[in-house]
Amino acid sequence: MGIVDLLLRLPGGAVYLQDFYELRMTDKEVPIDAAGLLWACAYKHAKDYLEGNLLPALIEWTQALNYFRSICQWKMRLYLDGMDNPHKEYENERRRLRRENAASGDHHAKIRNTPEYLAKAALIATHVLNIPCFITKEEADPHVAYVSLSKELVAVTGDSDLLAYGA
């Protein structure tokens, strides 16, 4: 369940919904679990992405990061997922089966952040945009939560897992 779905189910939770594009955090470091944004960019360009053409999704990714940096004035630190978490074998298998059994037009089920896509996104962020980018050992959620809590920063994610880590 994403954070939006969770907040909408909590009493008064909608008050806390913020559109990422409206948040202004000038001169404050913003740790970002970037997997959701990468997935959204791939989904927006699903036909190309699923055919192996990552370029449209990566261009969308670059535009979003430029927007956050220039308009929202975020001082970003990006965190990307590393290897699959062995403690989430059931979830990983469920997602794999959903991708395999998805109908031909069901791009939502078929999109996955591949290692190649993550690597190219990290190279663009680091070497083209000069945004610090870290690939975590497994999932980025616990690391983003730790950095946020230890430095009293605002974590940015669309993933409700961060709540479990206290962020």
Image (spheres, helix red, strand yellow):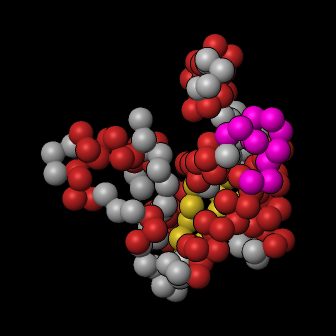
Residue 140 in the image, given as x and y percentages of width and height: 61, 49
Q: Quadrant of the C terminus?
A: bottom left
Q: Is residue 81 magenta?
A: no
Res 31 seen here: yes
Residue 57 in the image, given as x and y percentages of width and height: 71, 52
Report the residue that reaches farthest toward the bottom.
27
Q: Residue at x 24, y 39 (%)?
A: 9
Residue 82 in the image, given as x and y percentages of width and height: 73, 44
**Image height of 55 relative to 111, above or below:** below
Res 83 seen here: no
Report the label total: 0
**Image height of 76 relative to 28, above or below:** above
Residue situated in front as seen by the camera: 41 or 133: 41
* Horizontal relation, residue 62 to residue 72: left or right: right
Q: Is residue 54 magenta?
A: yes
Q: Main secondary structure of the magenta part?
A: helix
Q: Residue at x 41, y 35 (%)?
A: 1
Q: Which residues are magenta?
A: 46-56
Q: Quadrant of residue 20?
A: bottom left
